[in-house]
Amino acid sequence: MKGYNVLYYTKNAMIFGLIYLVGFIMSLILAFLLTKSSKIQISRRLFIMTLLVSFWLLMEMISFVASPKWILLFQILKYIGVILVPPILLIATVIFVKKDNKMRVPQRLSVYVIPALSLLSIFTGHIPYPFFTDPLVVIKQGIPIFTYIKNIGFLINTLYSYIIILVSCYLLLIRFLKSPMIYRKQSLFVFLGCSTTMVMNVLFITQKVFILPVDTTPIFIVITLVVFYWGVYHLPKILIVPYARDLVIENIKDLLFVLDNDECIIDVNPTALEFIRIYADPVLKREASLSMLIGKSIYEVLRHIPQVKDLLLPLDSTNDNTVELMQDGDKKYYRINVEEIYDGDRLKIGTLYLLHDMTQIKEQLNHLIELNDELMISDKIINDAIEGIVITNSDNIILRVNEAMTKMSGFSRDELLGNNPRILKSNYHDALYYQDMWNQITTQGYWEGEIWDRRKTGEVYPKWMTVTTINHPDGSIANYIGISSDISKMKKAEHDIHLLAYYDTLTGIPNRTLFYDRLNTALSHVKRNNSKIALIYMDIDHFKLINDSLGHDTGDQMLIEVTKRIKSVIREEDILSRLGGDEFTLLIEDENCSEVAASLAEQIINEVNKPIILKEKEITASISIGISIAPIDDITMEGLIRKADSAMYHSKESGRGKYAFSSAEIERRNHEQLELQIMLKQALQNNEFELYLQPQISFVNDQYTIIGAEALIRWNRDSEVIPPGRFIPAAEENGLILPISNWLTSEIFRMDQRLKDHGINIKLAINVSVKQFENKDYIQLLRKLLEEHSLQNIQLVVEITESMFIHDLNRAIEYLLEMKELGIQIALDDFGTGFSSLSYLTRLPIDYLKIDRAFVSSMDETQNRKLTYSIISMAKTLNLKTLAEGVETPDQAEQLVEVGCDELQGYYFSKPITLDEFIAFYNKRNYQ
C-alpha cells in the first residue's frame, strides 16, 4: 500500500461527518426496531443489512474526524458493508416476494461466492485477482478523499452488485403486478421506494444530478431500508385495516342476515344471498339481489324451505340450534346463532342472524364417530386376538402388548412396556439373521418368518412372526407392529411327523424311506468323487419262529435289543436303518469300505450271537449278513440293495449266522432261482406237475403188505423229472406253494379213484405246506372235495411238520380237530428233528409219528438205535402209530419190525413211482 499526501482539511469535513452521523443514528434506530418485529425471516436479513450499513457509515464518519494515518484503514474496512449489502438485499427481497417459497441453503450460499472472492482480494491484495491498487487519501476542498486504481476485482464486484440490485427491483415489480388488489398499494410503495432510491444513488454516483465530494451510497441504502421497513411493517395497517371489517363480512363463509326489530332484512352477505337463490321463492332464485331483499321479512324470503320453522325458531330465543336441510338430495347442516344489535345507548336496533355451515364438521364428526367405533373394534381385536401383538415406536420401544403376548412370553404387561423387544431374545439366531431381518423391514416395510424367542422362565420356543412398519404421512417410521403365534406344538407335530415318516417307531433308527434317501445321496457322492461305499444287508435268523412262538411283544423286544447291539459296534458316521420286520441295513462310506464292512459284520455277528434274555428265557439268536460294494458290484440303488440281499440269502443257505460278499457266483445262482420261479408259474399253468407214490408197508402174517402210499410231487420239465427239493423252496418264496398244494390235494382224490378202479383200497398220505394253515381256506377246500367224492370213502392222511404248531399251539390244535371231524388222519412228519416236546404230543390230535430217515439210517449206532426204540415205545404209550421212513436195507426193516414199528417206507421196498407203476407193483404182491 502506497503512502498518501495529507493536507489539513476544513470545517466542511465536519459538516459531512455530521451527515454520516445522522445516517448512522438512523440505521441504529432501524436495527433496534427490526429486533422487535414478528416477521423473523425477513427481519433477520434486514437487521444484518442495517448493521452492515451502520458499519459502512461509521467508517465514513470517523474518516472525517480521525487522525490522518487511520483514514486509509477506515476507507478499506467500509468495503465489508459495500460488498455484503447487495446479496443480503436480494435474499430479503426473495423472502418478501415469495413468502413460503424461500431460497434453499445452496442457493443462498451461491449468492455470496463473488462477494467472498472480492473480500479475499481486498485483504490479500491479489488473490484470486486484484481489487484495486495504489489506494490514497488526499484532501480536496478540505475534505479527505479516498482514491485508487480500479482493477478487475472491483469491476466484477460492482457489476455483480448492480445486477443483484436490478434483480431485487424486478422481483418487487413482479410482486406488485401479481398482488391482490388489497395488497397492491403496499407492493407498489415498496417497489417505488426501493427502485427510486437506487436510481437516485446511481445518478449521484455517475454525477448526473449534482456533484458532492463524498460517497452518498450508504445514505441512500439507509433510506431504502427505511422504505422497505415501512412498506413491510406499517403500511399494511394504514391501507388494509380500514377495509378489513368489510372484507370479513364479504368473505365469511357463514350466512349473515342483518334484521331490524321487525325481522325484516337490512343487509345480507354474498354467502347468504347465494343461499336464498337456492332455497327461497322460485321468483327470487336466480334474480335475487340485495336491493330486492331489503325490507322483506325473512319469513317471507325463506318460506319455501320445508324446515323454515326449525330454521327461524331461534329468532325467538338466544339459544344456539342446529337444523338439517336437504339440497339436491344431499343433507346440509347449519348451526344457527342469533345475536341482538344495540346502539350506543344500549337500545336494541336489530338482530344479527348467523347460519354457520356445519356440514363438513358434521361429516367429520360422523367420520370421527366411525373412526372411534373402528378404533374400539381394533382395540378389541388386539386385546382378544389369540396371536401375540407387540406395538413399538420408531425407536423400537414397546408401547403396547396384548394379553396373548403376555401369556406367550410369561412377562407381565408392566415388564414389557418401555422395554426393547430384545428382552425376548434367545440367542438362538446369529447376528446375521437379525441383520437380514432388519434390512428387509427397513427396505420393504415388512418381514415374516420363524424366530425363536425366550420366555421369562428361560425356555426357548419357536414362533411365527410378522413385523410391519407404520409410517407417518411424510414417510418416516411411526411404529412397528409385531404379530406372532407360538408354533411349539406345530413344530413338535412336524418333528413327530418327520420321525414317523423317516424313523422306525420301534427302534428309533432311520426307516426304509430315509435309508433310500441316504443311499441315493451316498451313491451321488460316489459318482462325483469316485469314492466307495459298502451296503450291509442283515436278517435275523429264525425271527419269525421266535416272534410267532413267544409273541409279538417279545419279538419287538428282540428287535430293540439287536438294534442296540448293532449300534454298539458300528461307527458314529455309519448309517443303520431298519427296512421292516427283521431286516436291517448298514451304510458305510469309507475308502477301505470292504475291510471295514467285513470287520463290522464279524463284530455284529458275534455281538448278536450272545444270549438274549426274553420273558425270563435265554434265547441265542443269530444274524445273516450280505455285503455289496459300490461302484464295484453296482452303482444303482436297486442293484446294490438286490445284490446285498442276495449275498445275505447265500449266508443263510450256507448255515446262517455268517456274512458273505456279493459275487458273480451268487448272482448266477440267483438268476437260476429267478428263472426257476418263472418256470414254476408256467408249470402250474401247463400241468407239468405229477404225483408219484411211494408204498407204505406193514409186516402182517409174516409178510410185508402194502397198506398205503405217500404221494410225492414231481415236476416234468423238458423230459427231465425235477425233485421237490429243487423247486419247493422257490415255490414257498414266491407264494406258488398255495396253488400247488391245492392242486396236489385235488389230484390225490383223482388218484384214489384210479386205484379203487383197479381194486386197490389203501390209505394215501399227502404233504401240505404250513402256509395252507394260515387261514381256513384249505379246510373249505378239503370239505368241498370230500363232499364231491363222498362215495370214494378215501382214506386220507395229511402229513404236517412241527413248524405248524410251534407258532400257535392252540390254533394248530383247533385246525387239526376240524380236519379230524372230516375223517382225515394226521401224521407228524420228521419227528425228532425239530422243537417238539412230549407235552405237545399229548395235546395234539395226531394218528401217526413218522420217524425221520436220519434216525433210521444211523441205527447201527447204539445211541441212535436206542433213541429210535424210545420213540416207538413212547408212541405206543400215546396210542400213536409209527411209520419209519428212509428204510433202505433188510436189516433196518427187520429191526424196526422187531421193536414194534407199525409201518415202513423207503427204497428197500420201492422208490417213488408213477401211478401206473404203483398199480403194477401192488398187483405183484411178491414181498419178502
Image: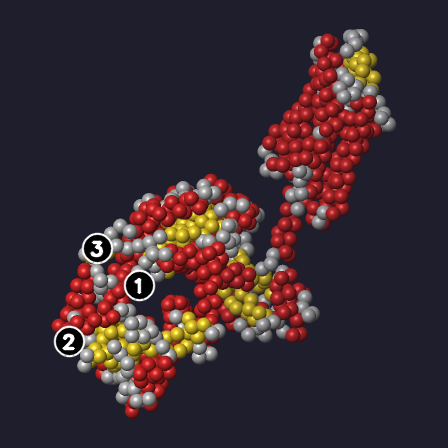
Quadrant in the rendering for residue 695 = bottom left
Question: Where is mark 1, residue-wise?
Answer: 544
Query: How many other residues sit within 10 Å of disc 2, few (<14), some (14-19) or many (≥20)?
Result: few
Marks 1 and 3, how far apart at CA? 17 Å
Quadrant in the rendering for residue 713 = bottom left
Q: Which mark is residue 879?
A: 2
Q: Outermost residue, bottom direction? A: 791
Residue 699 versus residue 856 in the image, above or below: below
Assess whether mark 3 and mark 1 are in contact (beta carbons under 8 angstroms). Answer: no
- Mark nearer the viewer, 2 or 3: 2
- Choose between 254 and 428: the one closer to the eye: 428
Question: Where is mark 3, residue-wise?
Answer: 618
Residue at x 45%, y 57% (from the top left corner): 666
For the rendered model, the colour scheme is: secondary structure
- Mark nearer the viewer, 2 or 1: 2
Residue at x 71%, y 11% (from the top left corner): 70
